[in-house]
Amino acid sequence: MDEFTLVAPSPPVDPFLKWAGGKRQLRSSLRQHYPPVFTGYVEPFLGGGTVFFDLATQGRLEDRPTTLSDVNGDLIGCYRMVRDHVEEVIQTLTDMAVGHTADHYDEVRDDFNAHRRRLRTRPGLVSDGYTPDLAARFIYLNRTGFNGLFRLNAHGAFNVPEGRYTNPTICDAACGGCRRSSADRRCAS
Ligand SMILES: C[S@@+](CC[C@H](N)C(=O)[O-])C[C@H]1O[C@@H](n2cnc3c(N)ncnc32)[C@H](O)[C@@H]1O
């Protein structure tokens, strides 16, 4: 189990990751089921974090103990880097966005896999080895890959092909929103 703290963005922002099974489209329906009063928030299947971001941007997690978790260590590593090194993540992501092409996607994916191979062959959790650079690659692949999928092959390599998007949003204000923080969040995977 590893943990991290995530900051609460304001004004409201959408999740910065596209995630299979994400609840963004259901947000207004889900809001009707938010309890009016609660003492803490536990999100066991974080993914793109739709409900977390919604509550956080409404200020409803202020001063409330919050635990976010997911079995996906890459996801947790990425969230940690956005929490701790958001300016570096944004800078790398912005540079990658400028150079985005199909060939560039393949290069970034190869690079991501080479970096992950090194992480997987050393002791410790994958999430503990994340760097701002790797997090930026994770987000780039998420924003430009097919349907935002995160899929690994039998050898543990990320093998999602490029998506067919015209001008995908690779780095938007959502990333910047994470800068404006006012609260601590705890997260585990
Ligand atoms: C449908 S997604 C969550 C979507 C998220 N609520 C959102 O709105 O974006 C499900 C998430 O649960 C995680 N997950 C699946 N099985 C899990 C498990 N046994 N323990 C922790 N997380 C798990 C997956 O990695 C995935 O990120």
Image (tube, rainbow, N blue to C red):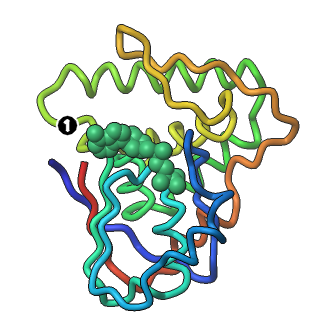
Q: Position of residue 60 (x, y in %)?
A: 45, 86
135 horizontally vs 12: left or right? left
Could you tell me which residue is drawn at 50 percent across and 66 percent down?
A: 51
Q: Nearer the viewer, residue 155 or 37?
A: 37
Q: Nearer the viewer, residue 11 or 108?
A: 11
Could you tell me which residue is drawn at 75 percent across and 33 percent down?
A: 100
Instruction: Classify mark 1: helix, strand or loop.
Output: loop
- Relative to 162, is 24 above or below? below
> Is disc 1 surrounded by few (<14), some (14 to 19) or many (20+) residues within 10 Å?
some
Extreme residue toward the right, this view: 166
Q: Quadrant of residue 19?
A: top right
- Relative to 113, is 87 above or below? below
Q: Quadrant of residue 164?
A: top right
Q: Which residue is mark 1?
A: 125
Disc 1 residue type (three-letter):
Leu
Look at the image and tell me whether residue 71 can be seen: no
Q: Position of residue 59 (x, y in %)?
A: 49, 88
Q: Position of residue 52 (x, y in %)?
A: 46, 68
Q: Nearer the viewer, residue 19 or 2?
A: 19
Could you tell me which residue is drawn at 56 percent across and 39 percent down?
A: 20
- Relative to 150, is 128 above or below? below
93 horizontally vs 165: left or right? left
